[in-house]
Amino acid sequence: MAIIVGVGGWFVYDLFEATEDELVNARARITLLEERVRITDEAVTETGATANEQINLWESEIRRLEQQRKKNKSAIEGNRAEHEKQAKTVTAIETSIRGLKAQVSRHEGSFTEQQKVLDELNTLQNNVEQLINQQRDLVDKVNVTSVTTSGLRSSLETRVKENEEAIVAIDAYRREVNARLADLKRRLESPRP
């Protein structure tokens, strides 16, 4: 039994020794854990303050954005009404443009016809100018011919007058010659004494 008590005593002593070491280790771990908790608490407190600041900033930004949204919403409503008005104006302008295109198309047809008429008038004008030029040439030729004829007439009149005078002189000479011949013939035919 003494052995059992010795073994039990040794076991209790060993257990006590082991518990004392474990207790020291446990205290060291508790101290370490307390230090970590303190550091974590400081970090959480600091992070909490920073998070509160960030939350306050975000809430302020959300309020600002909400105000901006309300302002933008009223501007959007105003723009929507203006857009509808502008859309009606654009539709009216498009209708007007279609009408103008139809008018332009009709005018282009008229312009084409007018251009044809103008081309024909230009052709006629060219023809008239050619006729006028030909007439001028003819008038010039007639004038030249008239001057030439006038010169010829004057020359011919002079020559005709000279010829008439020559014919009168020849006629007078012929009469005289005839008279002489007749006198000679009479003399020849009359008996001689």
Image (spheres, grey):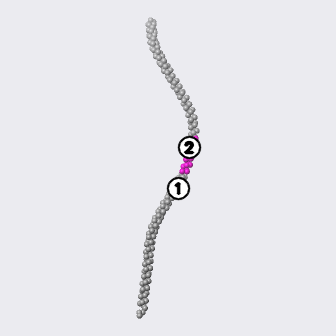
**94 vs 125: above or below:** above
Identify the amino acid type marked 1: Gln
Instruction: Residue 165 in the image: state x and y as whole percent.
Output: 44, 78
For mark 2, give the secondary structure.
Answer: helix
**98 vs 147: above or below:** above
**104 vs 138: above or below:** above
Give the residue drawn at x 46%, y 68%: 146
Give the residue drawn at x 52%, y 24%: 52
Residue contact between numbered discs 1 and 2, judged by CB atoms under 8 Å: no
Main SS of residues in magenta:
helix
Q: Which is in the foreground here, disc 1 or disc 2?
A: 1
Residue 163 image-quadrant placement: bottom left
- Magenta span: 85-104
- The answer to whether residue 22 is seen in the rendering is no
Q: Which mark is residue 168?
A: none
Instruction: Residue 72 in the image: state x and y as whole percent.
Output: 55, 34
Instruction: Return the disc, 1 or 2, that comes first in the chain's sequence.
Output: 2
In what quadrant of the picture does the C terminus appear?
bottom left
- The answer to whether residue 24 is seen in the rendering is yes
For mark 1, give the secondary structure.
Answer: helix
- 85 relative to 135 in the view: left or right: right
Name the residue carrying label 2: 90
Return the residue nearer the eye: 152 or 135: 152
Q: Residue furthest bottom?
A: 193
Q: Which mark is residue 114?
A: 1
Return the residue nearer the eye: 83 or 166: 166
Give the residue drawn at x 42%, y 90%: 187
How far is the residue under mark 1 from the one under mark 2?
34 Å
